[in-house]
Image: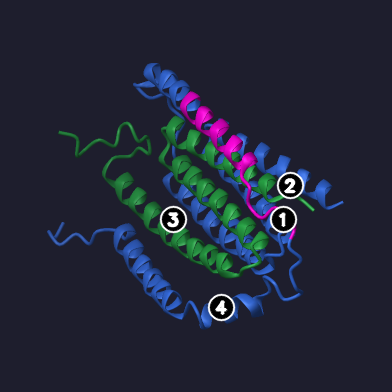
Chain colours: A blue, B green
Amino acid sequence: MELLIFYAFCVGAVVSALLMVTTKRPVRAAMSLVATMSFLAGLYALLNAHLIAVLQLIVYAGAIMVLFLFVIMLLNIEEKEGKLAKNVFFIQLAGTVVVGILMVAMVVVMNKMGAPVAAVAVDETFGTTKAVGWMLFTKYLLPFEIASVLLLAAIVGAVILAKRRIDNSGS
Amino acid sequence: MVSLNAYLMLGAVLFSIGAVGVLAHRNALIIYMCIELMLNAVNLTIVAFSRFLNSLDGHVYVFMIMTVAAAEAAVGLAILIALFRNKPTVDVDEINLSKG
């Protein structure tokens, strides 16, 4: 049963990721990415990472993708063929071939990896909000606080960058 | 029980798909999305290792990566809007103002 669910989510994630890469339209790519992230959330739940699965849905599939859709809407990009369209095909082909070789190499290495593959039985609390929160507020308290400063800097930076320039020249 | 290797291979495949997207696309928005996909693939690898090593540290790392990804998306998209105001395009080949 678990294997069946794993393969279903696996195929879903890869297919929607391929859909994202092959389309040229940003909205379609964004929706495919939402699907990929939802499938990945399912895989996280399968790995007993309950908090991470919910965060994946809320932060990635929710917040970040809504941000992307807002920007797509805001920029209102028209479809057009660039001047460089002739060379792009060969660049794409070269990129696909190189990364394809990389992917085969990675898959082979991952397959041979002699990691602790024997399924370790984890206790009931593994991956729950309580357990991860305990880690976050004890062992990783300093990184947690630094992350809040990072978020503040990102908020300020995004507002400063995206706000309309106030014209002081009097026009 | 699904083996660790299956999760690692899925992570590798997703990472490669994202890398192809970054190299093949000219639209800056889709390139950002592909970077998010690559971050997600790495997150999957970390969570899988965390589960099979029976250690919760990986979950905290993923938490931090999500924070950084959110900050990166916000600032990146703000840069894109600022660029779009100067030159109405999201084609990365046409954004070459600092090229000598």
For image coordinates 55% across by 61% down, the residue present is A63
Check if mark 2's residue and mark 1's residue have beta carbons within 8 Å: yes
Q: Secondary structure at mark 4?
A: helix
Label 4 belongs to which residue? A135
Q: Mark 1: which amino acid?
A: Gly
The furthest residue to the left: A169
* Other-residue count near label 2 (Cα within 10 Å), few / some / many at <14 / 14–19 / ≥20: many
Q: Mark 3: which amino acid?
A: Ala
**Residues under labels 4 and 3: Cα distance?**
26 Å
**Residues under labels 2 and 4: Cα distance?**
29 Å
Q: Earlier in the sequence, mark 2 or mark 1?
A: 2
* Front-most of residues A154 and B13: B13
Q: Which SS type dominates the magenta stretch?
A: helix
Residue A104 shown in magenta: yes
Q: Secondary structure at mark 2?
A: helix
Q: Earlier in the sequence, mark 2 or mark 4?
A: 2
Task: Give the magenta-colored segment's residue range.
Answer: A97-119
The lab-note entry on whether marks 4 and 1 share a chain reads yes
Q: Secondary structure at mark 1?
A: helix
Label 3 belongs to which residue? B73
Label 1 belongs to which residue? A42
Tell me residue A97's x, y (percent). 49, 24
Label 2 belongs to which residue? A9
- Chain on which label 1 sits: A
**Residues under labels 3 and 1: Cα distance?**
23 Å
**Residues under labels 3 and 2: Cα distance?**
25 Å
Check if mark 3's residue and mark 2's residue have beta carbons within 8 Å: no
